[in-house]
Amino acid sequence: MSSVMERIKAELDAYPIVLFMKGTPELPMCGFSARAVQALRAAGAHQLRTVNVMADPEMRANLPRFSDWPTFPQLFVQGELIGGADIVVELGEAGELERIVREATPA
């Protein structure tokens, strides 16, 4: 396994909720990343780990291979791919995202 794949796996092992996104929550570099962060914050994801794929070209190139998901952002909860911005927003609107976040980060 390449070192970038090991780094991706290490992020997923270390944090219950990881959003691989373009930019940062404070300065998202695309609307999809901004919407995903907004939905996660609205769902109560205060222990959200974000990884700026724009600052790491190797990770940006390899994460789609790791997850079998072609676009960014990518949300993982407890190591499992949840999906991209549209799925995150839909889960938020349905009230499911809040449950997923609560189960992943018990108080």
Image: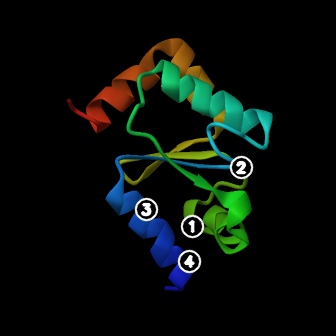
> CB atoms at circles 3 and 2 under 8 Å apart?
no
Picture coordinates of residue 84, whole percent (x, y): 63, 40
In three-dimensional space, the C-alpha distance between marks 3 and 2, rounded to whole angstroms, equals 16 Å
In three-dimensional space, the C-alpha distance between marks 2 and 4, rounded to whole angstroms, equals 17 Å
Kindly identify which numbered label has been placed on residue 4. Answer: 4
Answer above or below: position of 21 versus 92.
below
Kindly identify which numbered label has been placed on residue 12. Answer: none
Picture coordinates of residue 36, whole percent (x, y): 62, 32
Under circle 1, the secondary element is helix
What residue is shown with label 2? 22
Which numbered disc, 2 or 4, marks the residue closer to the eye? Answer: 2
Specify which label sits upstream in the sequence, 1 or 4: 4
Q: Give the amino acid type for the residue marked by disc 4 in the picture.
A: Val
In three-dimensional space, the C-alpha distance between marks 2 and 1, rounded to whole angstroms, equals 17 Å
Under circle 3, the secondary element is helix
Which numbered disc, 1 or 4, marks the residue closer to the eye? Answer: 4
Query: Quick one: which residue is furthest to the bottom in this view?
Result: 2
Specify which label sits upstream in the sequence, 2 or 1: 2
Specify which label sits upstream in the sequence, 2 or 4: 4
Q: Nearer the viewer, residue 69 or 50?
A: 50
In three-dimensional space, the C-alpha distance between marks 1 and 4, rounded to whole angstroms, equals 10 Å
Picture coordinates of residue 46, whole percent (x, y): 40, 32
Q: Give the amino acid type for the residue marked by disc 2 in the picture.
A: Lys
Picture coordinates of residue 88, whole percent (x, y): 57, 30
